[in-house]
């Protein structure tokens, strides 16, 4: 019986040693994985695009800093249009750091596909009179974000309005009444079925004297096709390009022939 008990004790000791060994190995593996994760995180931060802001969450919203102001943005994940897309961040950074090149002080600005409203907020803080447009299903969140972040901060109270690309534009937004110094658009080109309507809308609002600034991350072949059609439709220049993230910001004005047609010469 004593030998049997000793055998059990030996087995227990071996099991404890094996268990300790497994725990030690697991801990070592976790340490290695943790170190690798920290290394990858540091590398990602080093590779972080210059236009990407520092952002943190607080009380269910994302906090950004532009124009020396804290901007709190709520997202609505049930809609593509109500989440933050990277081109909005790139465009906000560009506008904030190129205030002389793109002077928005006192300018009339229209934003197409305003989404969460961040670009509209930044343009308003930079002194523009902004009309932010999008589809009805995102308008509630858009308006709340815009008004919350501009109240008491801006010279002009921004407006929020419905706009369906390509739909009855001359009746709802007649060019004789609605004239803008700048038209802004960020990440409005992606995998959807309304790219032709978007281009028609851009042409409608890009009148003589209007500058269109479009920021987009290239994701699909259709994005490249749209870009080619965009270049054919306007006089364009590339304001910014980040090859690592396929981010581009274009500036455009209407072509001479289009300008004459809009003036009624043709």
Image: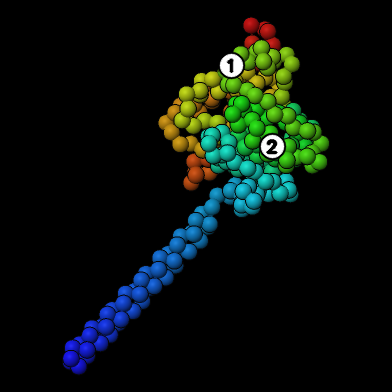
Cβ–Cβ under 8 Å for marks 1 and 2: no
Q: Is residue 210 above or below residue 118?
A: above
Q: Is residue 69 left or right of residue 247?
A: right
Give the foreground label among 1 and 2: 2
Q: Quickly name the residue at label 2.
A: 144
In the image, what residue occupies the spot 54% across and 52% down?
48
Find numbered disc 2 in the image and state the secondary structure of the residue it sits on: helix
Q: Is residue 148 left or right of residue 135?
A: right
Q: Is residue 53 left or right of residue 33?
A: right
Q: Quickly name the residue at label 1.
A: 167
Q: Position of residue 81 (x, y in %)?
A: 56, 33
Residue 240 quadrant: top right
Q: Position of residue 92 (x, y in %)?
A: 65, 41
Q: Position of residue 89 (x, y in %)?
A: 60, 43
Inspect this view and state whether residue 59 appears.
yes
Residue 138 quadrant: top right
Along the line of sight, the residue nearer the viewer: 77 or 173: 77
Q: What is the basis of the colouring in this image?
A: rainbow
């Amino acid at each position: 019986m004593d030998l049997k008990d000793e055998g059990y004790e030996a087995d227990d000791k071996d099991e404890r040693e094996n268990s300790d060994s497994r725990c030690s190995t697991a801990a070592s593996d976790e340490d290695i994985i943790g170190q690798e994760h920290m290394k990858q995180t540091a590398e990602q931060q080093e590779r972080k695009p210059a236009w990407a802001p520092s952002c943190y969450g607080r009380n269910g919203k994302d906090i950004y800093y532009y124009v020396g102001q804290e901007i709190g943005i709520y997202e609505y994940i049930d809609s593509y249009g109500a989440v933050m897309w990277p081109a909005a961040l790139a465009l906000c950074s560009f506008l904030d750091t190129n205030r002389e090149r793109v002077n928005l002080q006192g300018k009339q600005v229209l934003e197409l596909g305003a989404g969460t409203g961040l670009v509209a907020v930044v343009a308003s803080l930079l002194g523009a009179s902004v009309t932010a447009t999008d589809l009805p299903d995102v308008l509630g969140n858009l308006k709340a974000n815009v008004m919350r972040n501009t109240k008491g901060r801006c010279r002009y109270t921004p407006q929020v309005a419905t706009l369906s690309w390509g739909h009855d534009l001359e009746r709802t937004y007649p060019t004789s009444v609605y004239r803008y110094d700048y038209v802004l658009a960020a990440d409005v080109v992606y995998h959807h079925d309304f790219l032709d309507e978007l281009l028609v809308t851009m042409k409608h609002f890009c009148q003589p004297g209007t500058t269109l600034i479009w920021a987009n991350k290239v994701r699909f072949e259709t994005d490249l096709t749209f870009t080619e059609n965009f270049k054919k439709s306007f006089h364009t220049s590339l304001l910014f390009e980040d090859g690592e993230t396929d981010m581009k910001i274009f500036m455009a004005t209407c072509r001479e022939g289009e300008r004459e047609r809009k003036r009624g010469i043709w």
